[in-house]
Amino acid sequence: MGIAEAQTAEPLNMSESTRSVSPIVPAVPIITPSLREFDVKLALFLSPAFLGNALTGVRNKLNLCLLRYVDRLGGILLGYQNLKLVDHFAIISGDDPNLHIPVTMRALVFAPAIGEVLEGEITRLGKDHIALLVHGVFNASISIPAAKRTAEARRNAGHEVGDRIVFTVDSIHVADGLLSMKGSTIHSVSSSSKLAAESK
């Protein structure tokens, strides 16, 4: 398994700006289409307070990034393992007191792509959109066309809170390290009302 080299000696940061992105990740093993696990090499800046225990400082830094969008990973960091220091030396550059620590790890990342098909659970039915949760964590919404925004049209669509639907990702938005998606419906997977009726 190859190591994805960090291109600069910058700290691992969460996305700091509000912008739309098209996540790009290395060619890596795919657990599901949007969940990717791969080996990566990163450079982090740590406080000198961790000089005696750099690995603890690295874990603290990475834990702050969990469930946040990380630019250099191309998605949301869900977890990591096999964390190792590249060597036993740290670099201090110029008058910057922070320690430059290169590490390697195996990262699990949620990295959806535009055009990808995902499944979500309906959490709210609005007048002009359907709110979803993907994998029980990530927000997504599907716009309802103007012609279908009447109460009767929504009833005819048959969607209810708790239903699972399959949708295509049309756009991805990242703000302050949080990721959201907008999509278009393909079809329903399950209906909470139908499942309840069948169980009786």
Image (cartoon, grey):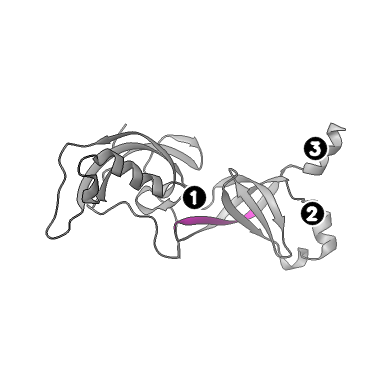
Report the residue marked by disc 3.
195
Q: Is residue 140 above or below residue 197?
A: below
Q: CA distance from mark 2 to mark 1?
A: 27 Å
Mark 1 secondary-structure assignment: loop
x, y (%) of residue 94? 11, 59
Comparing 115 with 133, the one in front is 133
Q: Which residues are magenta?
A: 177-184
x, y (%) of residue 6? 26, 47
Comparing 58 with 166, the one in front is 58
Ranked by sequence position, the earlier of labels 2 and 1 is 1
Q: Residue furthest bottom?
A: 146
Comparing 63 with 26, the one in front is 63
x, y (%) of residue 122? 69, 50
Ranked by sequence position, the earlier of labels 3 and 2 is 2
What residue type is disc 3 on?
Leu
Q: Residue 157, which numbered label?
A: 2
Q: Residue 38, which numbered label?
A: none
Q: CA distance from mark 3 to mark 2?
A: 17 Å
Number of marks in the rendered image? 3
Res 118 quadrant in image: top right
Q: Quadrant of the N terminus?
A: top left
What residue type is disc 2 on?
Ala
Q: Are there few (<14), some (14-19), or many (20+) residues within 10 Å of tag 3?
A: few
Report the residue marked by disc 1.
113
Determine contact: label 3, label 1, CB under 8 Å: no
Q: Residue at x 58, y 53 (%)?
A: 139
Mark 3 secondary-structure assignment: helix
